[in-house]
Image (tube, grey):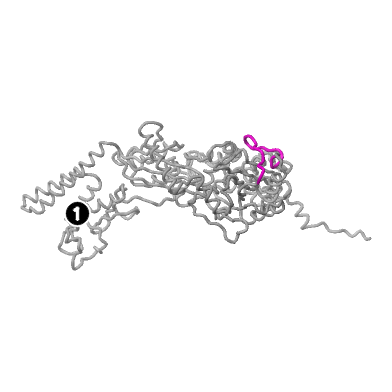
Amino acid sequence: MDLHEKIRTLPTRPGVYLYKNAGGEVIYVGKAKNLRSRVRSYLLEASQANAKTGSLMREAIDVDYILVDNEHEALALENNLIKQRKPRFNILLRDDKTYPYVRLTLADRYPRVFVTRRLRKDGSAYYGPYFPGNLAWRIADLIHRSFLIPSCKVDLSRYHPRPCLQYYIHRCLGPCVEGLTTPEAYREAVRDTQMFLEGRGTELSKSIEQRMQAAAENEQFELAAKYRDLLITISQLSEKQRIASTENDDADVYGYHYENGMIAVNLFHMRGGKIVDRREFFWEDLPEFVLESGEEEASALASGASQPFDSSAFFSALLKQLYIDQHYVPKSIFVPVDFADRETLSALLAERTGHRVELAAPQRGEKRSLVDLAGQNAKQSYDQRFRVLQPSQKAIQEALQDIFMLEDPPRRIECFDISHIQGAETVASMVVWEDGAMKKSAYRKFKIKTVEGVDDFASMREVVSRRYRRILEGSNAAGNGKQEDNGKQEKEPKEAPSLILIDGGLGQLHAAAAALEELGLTTQPLASIAKREEIIYLYGQENDPIVLDRRSPVLHLIQRIRDESHRFAITYHRKRREMRDRDSELLTIPGVGARTRQRLLEHFGSLRSVQNAGLEALTAVVSRKTAETIHAHFHADAAAAENPLPILDNGA
């Protein structure tokens, strides 16, 4: 059964769906109130040239699902599966910082108190989390001094000849030595500790007061004095808690700053109406289904809009992973943007915690001011993490001059990129950085004319040659005749740029260099930046590549120029592909109608990809019989070459 047929058979009940690729790997996990309706929506979005789902659907060949009783269970199951499978197209919480808890080992013969950051199902009672982090240690120290419950690692399953130092400084009852305490006295101390950690101060005070009076009546004055001091300590702590609770409830406040494909998030922990701690999160490689845009968004970008970022989907994924499995959730959570399943998540958290959880995106007032404050701090966090320093434009130009060994600080950088899908509709882009900013009126796009098939090197050579031949000829014509650039066209410059930047590795670099040499531009500064490794190759010194620090402002500038070139090329390529696919060879194949043609193009991305697809890949989209017909249509020549007709002997 192919993917489309399987989607049509999905039930309409709540559940979780898992998209898989050809290797059986789970690449995306989602939840839905209506499985069939939600999963079918991906096909619609992909058909509308929505890149963020198009890239997912081109890779997915199968979908599994798990039914649940309601949307709350779907939300919890989705969260667990994302943490277990870590799908590539989901937003993953990469920050592993956790706040401390106080652990009371009730399963032990003599329970002890520890500070821990991990929660386990080991029979222990966990209390927290505590903000700031050192508060947990202060509470554990108070328990040692007031209730004499230890944190030692001594084996208490047997008796030892003598106690440790903690007993002698009156921070332990000494259960490790026979006769120093009794099981009854130790259980009493454990009960007091539990009531203290659970916030049952009034009940604890009454119990201790009764024991104090009984000790005084029995003339055990030292014991009575100990109970008296403990009562004073508990009274002081309870008073502080009452003062704090009258000010405000606990709340978590979020703010974020997104730029250049990277995001910083700040989380303010407010306890008792006061900010007691701040937590930072950073992402440098968000899933492409969040960052990529469709054709309409790409057009908006080309006219000057900022890079798209689905903040609603991001915060929906982040809050699920942060709170669903937590023992403690504050009564209020404030986020900068609203998201679709906010009310469902709020109801689930309330159900699990036993108290109402307000999950809101405030628009005005004091709560919005707190969110804005968190956002301002996120901006500072972003600058410290990703920019470190914000040098002046002059300093960046001087750094560029030094790195690329230029005669003068660069004023203009032109960057080239090639875009295609398996050689189909190959196009190229050129973007321009000038005097500290991207100059959109100088952008150019090219349709490759002389290269057949997949040959990025030859394509790069053609584009660079065409571009700078026109400059040498002094022509004011655009790089590819009829231009489709956004905005007003500028005249071609009279001289070559300060630096030519190529998106690619050594192959693309040498292809561009060959084109420049043919034109006699042998002294033109030329460099390339390789994807993934982010290594910069300077032509003439390829054996000594430039590796900049990941947080270098110069590297960020080069990446920004390269990414803009890539975006501009993809936008043009999509437009060309859309125009080409309006009339397809697929319609001439028997058994392939308009709907089947649309499904094939949605799944494979282009006619060329359908032509090159194997029989098994085609079967994942259409029936076996139709797949065989399509495969035979595009591979008829190859089959004829392998099995030529026999030469008949006519007796001559």
Q: Quadrant of residue 607?
A: top right
> Residue under circle 1?
145
Q: Secondary structure at mark 1?
A: helix
How many marks are shown on the rendered structure?
Answer: 1
Q: Is residue 575 visible?
A: yes
Q: Position of residue 251 (x, y in %)?
A: 34, 40
- Whether residue 333 is situated above or below residue 208 in the rendered picture: above
Which residue is outermost to the right? 652
Image quarter of the C terminus: bottom right
Q: Magenta segment: does it hold 493?
A: yes
- Whether residue 183 is situated above or below residue 622 in the rendered picture: below
Q: Name the one closer to the observer, 411 or 316.
A: 411
Q: Which residues are magenta?
A: 477-495
Q: Position of residue 642 (x, y in %)?
A: 77, 58
Q: Magenta segment: does it hold 208?
A: no
Majority secondary structure of the magenta segment? loop
Which residue is outermost to the top? 364
Q: Is residue 231 left or right of residue 603?
A: left
Q: Is residue 580 left or right of residue 56?
A: right
x 20%, y 67%: residue: 160
Q: Residues within 10 Å of mark 1 (few under 14, many from 20)?
A: some
Q: Name the one closer to the observer, 410 or 590.
A: 410
Give the amino acid type for the residue marked by disc 1 in the picture: Arg
x 47%, y 47%: residue: 391
